[in-house]
Image: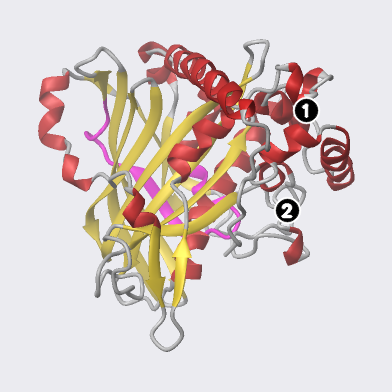
């Protein structure tokens, strides 16, 4: 797991005030952009696919499936939703805890669902930042520049070096997260596997930012193995920028027919269940999708893992989210909460979003630990990024 990096702030007192105003304005604009990008009709046109049976060679789908949603009143959906299944936002006390039995250590982490929109809102247009070139005047502008360096390690290193040397006050604000997002040459290589964060490992060049898990329990609870046996379960988290329009992003998320070809995948068949796919507007007039998906994996030879998830895609305060909860299967715990925050430039262009994923996972009978569970979060974020960006770049 990656070491936690502190974000340093500039020493001049008025920088804090500048950042506070910039963050507020940019956050308001980002939420507005996120809410307006995708309407219900567009949402319903995004295919929901599955694969009932793989081909004999395991490389294709012999029995594909595509479902269309049934538009349904929000009141009728309430019985299918369970607010208790949502992973709650952690409080400060859940971001620090003690681990180990013989050698004790304190883990301090952060809530990426809160930090990501703050980072994306950073702007440096005030002369005090010395951002004399447009590409460094906001995090959105920086990401737009690095978007065009996809997989080019030399160019990415060169730009990061120039940012650090020529624009030190901007660098001081982004050094704690930007390098992990923009160094992505390993992710886009044929060698990428979610079990590794870099190649060579120390490069940390998979384009995915991770921080230690937070606890569902209070601070300094006795830390369990990850299954909640003594104080609380760990919630694993990862995030990455995805340079694709909303339609391409959600089409990738919903393309279960091709989940078996994802890097590091052990899926045998994945498909949405007939009669489970609903769409509509919630009580605030915001679009939603709700559907159940059957998963069949083989994490170990001769051992099959089957489970069904209910997936709920919706907006909350203008922010796209996906919440997944376990309906049945070989799991002690499985639920996810995913956040999608738009990446905006100073010109108002939306160039993609950052996907932030939380996962609460414990498989029955599988001796999985922290590294395995973190690999699950990393693998989902990385695979969706790879496939969605590839689709967005296709003619």
Report helix, strand or loop for mark 2. loop
- Residue contact at pointers 2 and 1, CB within 8 angstroms: no
364 relative to 182, above or below: below
Task: Find residue 205 and name its label.
Answer: 2
| Quadrant of the image occupied by residue 362 | bottom left
Indicate the position of residue 194 as horizontal and vertical percent values.
Answer: 59, 59
Indicate the position of residue 101 as horizontal and vertical percent values.
Answer: 38, 85
Q: Is residue 274 magenta?
A: yes
154 vs 114, nearest the viewer = 114
The quarter of the picture where the C terminus appears is top right
Q: Is residue 155 magenta?
A: no
Indicate the position of residue 107 as horizontal and vertical percent values.
Answer: 46, 66
Residue behind mark 1: 145
| Quadrant of the image occupied by residue 280 | top left
- Mark 1 is surrounded, within 10 Å at the Cα level, by few (under 14), some (14 to 19) or many (20 or more) other residues, namely some
Q: CA distance from mark 2 to mark 1?
A: 17 Å
71 relative to 244, above or below: above
335 relative to 225, above or below: above
Q: Residue at x 34, y 22 (%)?
A: 317
Give the side of residue 199 with respect to residue 117, left or right: right
Give the side of residue 347 with respect to residue 259, left or right: right
Range of residues picked out in magenta: 256-278
Q: How many marks?
A: 2
260 vs 350, nearest the viewer = 350
Q: Residue at x 45, y 70 (%)?
A: 106
254 vs 111, nearest the viewer = 111
Q: Please, which residue is most extreme toward the bottom here?
A: 102
The quarter of the picture where the N terminus appears is bottom right
């Amino acid at each position: 797991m990656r070491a936690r990096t502190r974000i340093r702030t500039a020493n001049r007192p008025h920088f804090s005030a500048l950042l506070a105003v910039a963050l507020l304005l940019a956050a308001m604009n980002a939420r507005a952009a996120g809410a307006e990008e995708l309407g219900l009709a567009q949402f319903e046109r995004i295919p929901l696919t599955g694969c009932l049976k793989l081909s004999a060679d395991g490389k294709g789908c012999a029995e594909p499936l595509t479902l269309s949603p049934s538009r349904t009143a929000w009141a009728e959906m309430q019985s299918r939703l369970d607010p208790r299944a949502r992973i709650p936002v952690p409080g400060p006390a859940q971001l620090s805890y003690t681990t180990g039995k013989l050698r004790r250590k304190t883990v301090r982490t952060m809530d990426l669902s809160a930090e990501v929109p703050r980072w994306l809102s950073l702007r440096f247009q005030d002369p005090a930042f010395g951002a004399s070139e447009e590409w460094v005047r906001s995090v959105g502008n920086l990401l737009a520049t690095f978007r065009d360096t996809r997989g080019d390690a030399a160019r990415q290193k060169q730009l990061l070096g120039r940012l650090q040397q020529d624009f030190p006050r901007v660098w001081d604000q982004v050094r704690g997260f930007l390098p992990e997002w923009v160094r992505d040459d390993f992710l886009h290589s044929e060698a990428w596997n979610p079990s590794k964060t870099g190649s060579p490992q120390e490069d940390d060049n998979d384009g995915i930012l991770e921080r230690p898990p937070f606890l569902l329990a209070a601070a300094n609870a006795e830390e369990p193995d990850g299954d909640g046996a003594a104080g609380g379960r760990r919630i694993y988290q990862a995030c990455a920028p995805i340079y694709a329009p909303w339609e391409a992003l959600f089409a990738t998320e919903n393309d279960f027919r091709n989940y078996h070809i994802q890097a590091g995948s052990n899926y045998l068949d994945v498909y949405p269940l007939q009669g489970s796919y609903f769409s509509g507007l919630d009580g605030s007039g915001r679009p939603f999708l709700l559907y159940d998906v059957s998963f069949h994996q083989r994490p170990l030879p001769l051992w099959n893992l089957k489970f069904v998830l209910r997936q709920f895609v919706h907006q909350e305060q203008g922010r796209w989210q996906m919440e997944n909860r376990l309906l049945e299967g070989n799991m002690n715990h499985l639920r996810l909460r995913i956040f999608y925050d738009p990446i905006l430039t100073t010109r108002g262009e939306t160039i993609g979003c950052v996907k932030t994923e939380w996962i609460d996972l414990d498989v029955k009978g599988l001796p999985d630990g922290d590294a395995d569970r973190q690999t699950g979060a990393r693998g989902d974020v990385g695979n969706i990024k790879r496939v969605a960006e590839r689709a967005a770049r296709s003619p």
